């Protein structure tokens, strides 16, 4: 289809331009490539290259910033070539040290999903303190799910073009004992041919450290979508809304996570209400239970364990983390259903090793045992051995 080919040609041209042909003045422009490999059921092994583009010695903080990738699905599906492109250009008139304003353009067609966005960004921080900042983004975007074979649960998606206008806001504050972050997104769908829905999400995290490997972590989440036909923006009690699965390579397409694990409630994709004890109940069933509004409170008490203590003392302590914690979740799905709660114990292994391009490359892998839930399915016990494999941190600080 033509709308897919044109942006792809732009990306290929960008990747093939030699560095010296776009080097101007004192500093040259660098295109730094790195190989990339992934897997899903439809593409098979997906091979490609990712590229960072920046002015030399700007350390990803200068003009003409590029983040792009192009891939080939070795199963050769109907659309075997996919791409991602993100270009950021600072605006000097609204920028100063630590307070950049920029325009951002993003285009992506991969795993059966097409999304294109134009945004105006602004950041504020005081002096050199990068741990305390605020960011705001105004954006307009278009998105469409055009190939349902990639979706783990196709019935949770509509296939209309959605034109969205919205705002993202982030506030981050960190000192020696506390980390706080608040994220807000509001967006309105504009197409007459699609449900003209409104979507809003508010997410607040807070972590208070008493001493090393001992902390109390809290999260509050509220999410709502105004139209039940906006299927991919709806919630379950346990998982992120389907649209949020697109932001993570592990959950982006069918088959990277074994499908039966998700269907049987063994796996939880973090986001939304995150009531992790309900993945194998009717409230967490992605195919049969969806709701337009959720409110949830997630709490974790981290305590030390011998492995995490030994890891933190070595060189791996800067990259590899093992967290042990007790957790409770409580929330409501606003469907005239009871308040849902759970409690249990968990381990979270996380790793963050910068890749060849210097970008953070990390993930969180959780094994949790929610030994009590307040509203089990008919015939089940409140107390039961349940186990959940989680992808992504519930409290992402």
Image (cartoon, grey):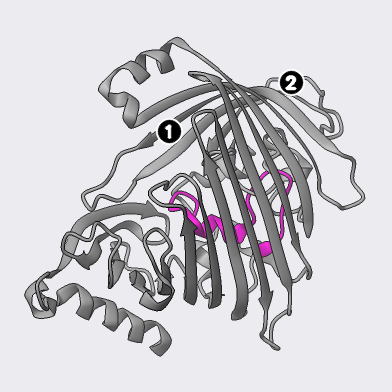
Evaluate whether residue 270 shows in this view. no
Residue underneath mark 1:
350
- The crowding category of the residue bearing disc 2, from other C-alpha atoms within 10 Å (few below 14, some 14 to 19, many at least 20), is few
Nearest to the observer: residue 267 or residue 336: 336
Query: Farthest residue toward the right?
Result: 336
Residue underneath mark 2:
384
**Secondary structure mainly formed by the magenta segment:** loop
| Nearest-to-viewer mark from 2 and 1 | 1
**Disc sitting over residue 335 in the figure:** none
CA–CA distance between discs 2 and 1?
27 Å
Per the rendered image, the range of residues in magenta is: 233-252
Residue occupying image coordinates x 81% and y 49%:
333
Nearest to the observer: residue 312 or residue 267: 312
Residue 310 in the image: above or below residue 158? above
Q: What element carries label 2?
A: loop
Residue occupying image coordinates x 41% and y 54%:
40
Query: Where is residue 78 drawn, in percent x and y?
Result: 39, 74
Quadrant housing the N terminus: bottom left
């Amino acid at each position: 289809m033509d709308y897919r080919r044109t942006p792809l040609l732009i990306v290929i041209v960008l990747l093939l331009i030699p560095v010296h042909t776009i080097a101007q003045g004192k500093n040259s422009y660098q295109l730094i490539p790195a190989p990339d490999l992934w897997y899903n059921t439809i593409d098979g092994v997906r091979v490609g290259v990712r590229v960072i583009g920046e002015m030399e010695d700007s350390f990803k903080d200068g003009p003409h910033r590029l983040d792009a990738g192009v891939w080939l699905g070795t199963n050769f599906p109907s659309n075997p070539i996919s791409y991602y492109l993100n270009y950021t250009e600072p605006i000097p008139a609204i920028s100063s040290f630590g307070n950049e304003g920029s325009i951002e353009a993003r285009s992506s067609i991969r795993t059966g999903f097409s999304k294109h966005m134009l945004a105006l960004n602004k950041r504020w921080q005081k002096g050199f303190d990068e741990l305390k900042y605020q960011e705001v983004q105004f954006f307009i975007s278009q998105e469409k799910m055009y190939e349902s074979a990639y979706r783990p649960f196709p019935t949770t998606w509509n296939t209309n073009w959605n034109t969205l206008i919205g705002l993202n806001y982030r506030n981050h504050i960190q000192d020696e004992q506390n980390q706080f972050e608040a994220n807000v997104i509001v967006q309105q769908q504009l197409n007459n041919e699609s449900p003209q829905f409104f979507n809003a999400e508010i997410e607040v995290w807070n972590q208070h450290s008493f001493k090393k490997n001992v902390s109390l972590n809290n999260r509050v989440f509220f999410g709502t979508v105004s139209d039940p036909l906006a299927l991919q923006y709806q919630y379950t009690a346990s998982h992120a809304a389907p649209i949020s699965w697109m932001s993570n390579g592990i959950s982006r397409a069918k088959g990277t996570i074994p499908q039966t694990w998700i269907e049987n409630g063994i796996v939880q994709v973090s986001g939304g209400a995150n009531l992790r004890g309900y993945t194998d109940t009717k409230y967490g069933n992605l195919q049969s239970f969806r709701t337009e509004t959720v409110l949830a409170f997630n709490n974790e008490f981290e305590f030390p364990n011998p492995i995490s203590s030994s890891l933190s003392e070595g060189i791996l302590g800067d990259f590899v983390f093992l967290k042990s914690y007790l957790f409770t979740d409580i929330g409501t799905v606003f469907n005239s259903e009871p308040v849902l709660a759970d409690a249990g114990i968990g381990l979270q292994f996380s790793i963050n090793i910068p890749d060849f391009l210097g970008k953070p490359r990390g993930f969180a892998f959780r094994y949790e045992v929610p030994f009590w839930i307040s509203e089990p399915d008919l015939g089940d016990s409140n107390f039961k051995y349940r186990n959940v494999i989680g992808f992504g941190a519930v409290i992402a600080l």
